[in-house]
């Protein structure tokens, strides 16, 4: 855990619940929630729509825009919550570097069959379900040295959000709306 972090990013593969959990955390903390999907350029969205995995070169500008927006939101509101796959450690390190401050990642961990069931049951603007295997192949599970909070996603969204908040005692004031 990164004590004092003002930026929280809910991370994981597609359909792990990043947006739902991130929005729940934002509500509970009275903090802005920024969904990483909204920061992808049109070219990235089109590639994913066609089932073409993004390259690192596709991701760097997207990650930078999201990190800068989260920093700005945290400056304004004191804390900000984001949702972003952040599948590789290099992406997580890059986000923290571009945000210019510590970022607390919350990894939504679930097995591929659970996530496959979830992705089949939803409609997404551009995320092609065929990309799920490539997401799991790209995923570098956070190591203990990274200080990432890991939560099992095989439970309701509010339970996942509660588990994440219990691991972040420094944000209690924000839960009261301060």
Image: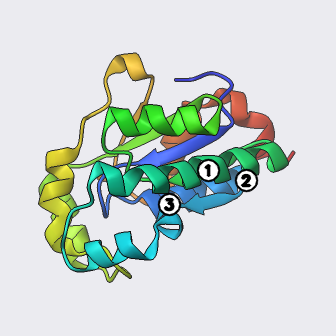
- Label at residue 36: 3
Q: Marks 1 and 2: CB-CB under 8 Å?
A: yes
Q: Which of 7 and 175 is in front in this view?
A: 7
Q: Marks 1 and 3: CB-CB under 8 Å?
A: no
What percent of the width, then of the height, locates residue 41? Answer: 46, 70
What percent of the width, then of the height, locates residue 17? Answer: 39, 60
Q: Which residue is drawn at 51% across and 40% down?
A: 95
Name, please, the residue furthest toward the right: 178
- Label at residue 31: 2
Q: Which residue is drawn at 60% across and 31% down?
A: 168
Q: Please say whether residue 53 is visible from this viewpoint.
A: yes
Q: Which mark is nearer the camera, 1 or 3?
A: 3
Whole-angstrom CA distance, mark 3 to mark 2, is 16 Å
Task: Please report whichever mark, 1 or 3, sits nearer to the chain's N-terminal start.
Answer: 3
Please rate how many residues cluster around mark 3, counting C-alpha atoms within 10 Å: few if below 14, some from 14 to 19, many from 20.
Answer: many
* Element type at mark 1: strand
Q: Mark 1 points at which residue?
A: 81
């Amino acid at each position: 855990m990164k004590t004092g972090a003002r930026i929280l990013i809910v991370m994981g593969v597609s359909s792990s619940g990043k947006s739902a959990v991130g929005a729940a955390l934002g509500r509970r903390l009275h903090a802005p929630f920024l969904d990483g999907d909204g920061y992808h350029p049109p070219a990235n969205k089109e590639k994913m729509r066609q089932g073409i995995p993004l390259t690192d070169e596709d991701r760097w500008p997207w990650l930078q825009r999201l990190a800068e927006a989260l920093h700005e939101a945290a400056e304004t509101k004191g804390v900000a919550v984001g949702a972003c796959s952040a599948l590789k450690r290099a992406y997580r390190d890059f986000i923290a570097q571009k945000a210019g401050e510590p970022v607390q990642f919350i990894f939504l961990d679930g097995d591929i069959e659970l996530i496959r069931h979830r992705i089949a049951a939803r409609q997404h603007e551009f995320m092609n379900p065929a990309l799920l295997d490539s997401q799991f192949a790209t995923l570098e599970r956070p190591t203990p040295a990274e200080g990432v909070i890991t939560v099992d996603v095989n439970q309701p969204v509010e339970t996942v959000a509660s588990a994440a908040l219990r691991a972040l005692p420094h944000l209690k004031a924000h839960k009261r709306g301060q």
